[in-house]
Amino acid sequence: MTIEELQDIGKIEKEKQEGFKYRIHVCVAAGCLSSQSGLVKEALEKEVARRGLESWALVKGVGCLGLCTAGPMVAIEPDGLLYQGVSVSDASDILEALGGPPVNRLDCSAHLPFFARQKKIVLENCGRIDPESIEDYVAEGGYGGLYSALRTMTPAGVIEQITKSGLRGRGGAGFPTGLKWTAVSKTKSNVKFVICNADEGDPGAFMDRSVLESDPHRVLEGMAIAGLAVGANYGFVYVRAEYPLAVKRIRTAIARAERLGVLGRNIFNTTFSFDVTVRLGAGAFVCGEETALIASIEGRRGSPRPRPPFPSELGLWGYPTLINNVETFANVPPIIRKGGAWFASIGTEKSKGTKVFALAGRVNNTGLIEAPMGTTLREIVFDVGGGIIGDRKFKAILTGGPSGGCIPDQFLDMSMDYESLAQVGAIMGSGGLIVMDDSSCMVDVAKFFIEFCMSESCGKCVPCRVGTVQIYNLLKRITEGGGKPSDIQLLEELCDLVKNTSLCGLGQTAPNPVLSTMRYFMDEYKAHIEDKVCPAGTCHMNPTEESQ
Amino acid sequence: MDEKEVDRIKVNEDRRWRLVNRTMRLHGHQPDALIETLHAVQESFGFLDLDSLKYVAESLRLPLSLVYGVATFYHFFTLKPPGDHTCVVCLGTACYIAGSSNILKTVEEQTGIKPGETTPDRKLSLLTARCMGSCGLAPVVVFDGEVHGKMSSASVLENVGRLLNHDD
């Protein structure tokens, strides 16, 4: 494969698609598929065939169009029309309207701010390309980054661009990617591994799933560039078994890429070889932690181990291993194509680029969004998210899932970046954003998360295994009306202990939701304990004699 | 399970075992094939019983204790046979905020079973999940592998009723 051959593939595909006057894009990511978008696509195809328009209109399945709440979504190119809530019976009207005025009842223009406020790098192909077609990805410049990295750059040059871009790990902790790559590249070993962490166990987050389902080749290209930079020839994608569609699409993508010669042996006629294997997770939140993930790939229980040594020195089967999140890898190809300086020009001083968020909860527009670092919470909730459902009052937004914190309304104008979030006791996390209105009880939310951490604790270290149970019991007692005034101090002490003495990230961050709700919503805790009332009305307060 | 029985399975490869054996072969019967193999067993049989755990342990030359440890560590694996139909209520954050705990309570009341249990007539298994990744459609309930979004207690009860009265 030469660059000319690659460009030809892209050109032919582009010409083929542009030969159609209209291209009808139907979202076939998991969100829309569960609202029957598969049937909608079939109906549209049948309708095109019935009208004999096969050479005029193309029906194409594409990745996530973003606005999951309004699914199934259908986009009409090149008009740029967007239809929402499309059903099988609408197929005929949609075709009828091609070239004329749009179908008004399906019009999605009311959601315009949702799309206008976003900036897409990771998701640039989502909703535009067919995730199962490698040609479509190549037509958008795909694998061009891998080619330039292989043919025009040295491994050190690739790492230099990544370092210059200021890209930080998108899995949550925000560790500078360039530093991680440098550490692995400096180790002396003939065997090294690259692992893509797609074990998105954080409830309320679906960014990694959407990227894998919508644009799997981008992740593979990022992994291959990483392999080249650090000197690894094997890659693993560790993905949740709960995401069957993502598993299927990444497996298809690997097979197609190998056939085309952009993965496997002697990529682009160089000496570089890179093989990727999919490994299935089996439903353990702790396996998102890198040492636990490695144990799981090795076929063992996912128990973390103390670090150092870090996986960059002693990883999979004892070899140096680079572990990055799906979104981190997805950022790599554009950085190589456009340069580190371009990426560094987006975002804030210390947090560069964009971040993909899964916006869910009590907002009108739920779905997948991507915004530059530094966008304020207000813009995300009220402009992109379209405000709170039913004009209720915004209460808090939860970032980072069970390891994150609840941010109250006084910080709505805060910029979203790693440092600012840490300052208010939350974390960036993988990007799940859950918006809560005044119908949510914050003590109950804290209980919900600690219950999650309690059941997901692997049981290896005592503070996490025992501490989370004790915190849960205290919160349960409080939400049932049996709380004592001394419980507050007890909670604070316990949280402090679990946070500072646990072995891995799960335990160290488990108390965050409790601590942040106590910090900003102490009045709700007090109402539960002193007045035996739940201000939001969600807890069933039932104080008994003995618990008093 | 003695060695003879292991051989019997190997020789008379039941069609369902074929997938399992193929998975192990693909990984060269290395110990790291364990989780992939358990996935294959669960895909073929719906659950992991003691005999299949013994067979996998034997084939991969791993202690049974380790195989059992892995099978019980991961939530995805189930050691109990599922009912004819499954109803999975998502208790992820977005669904929880949207009231999925009430949905679960109604289903529990109607069927008389708790999460992880199967009705006595083996028609329906009730399960809970931690996020299906369809948070935009919260609250989500999965019936027989099919994701249903924006559910209410009433619509879930209707679906559960349909599954319970289904005769096959």
Image: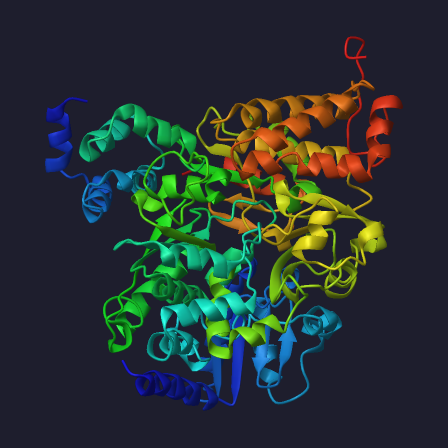
Residue beneath the point at 67% across and 70% down: A118
Q: Residue at x 59, y 65 (%)?
A: A72
Q: Position of residue A41 (x, y in %)?
A: 50, 70
> Which image quarter: residue B55?
top left
Q: Is residue A342 above or below residue A55?
A: above
Residue at the extreme top: A546
Quadrant of the rendering where the N terminus of chain A is positioned: bottom left
Give the position of the C terminus of chain A as an image quadrant: top right
Image coordinates for residue B44, horizontal then vertical, percent: 30, 41
Where is residue B56 drawn, in percent x and y? 24, 33
Query: Would you say B106 lies left or right of A330 here?
Result: right
Quadrant housing residue A345: bottom right
Regarding residue B98, the answer to whether it shows in the image is no
Viewer-side residue, B153 vs A75 = A75
Q: Which of these two is toward me, A193 or A31? A: A193
- Residue in the foreground of this view, choosing between A99 and A191: A191
* A347 with respect to A466 (left or right): right
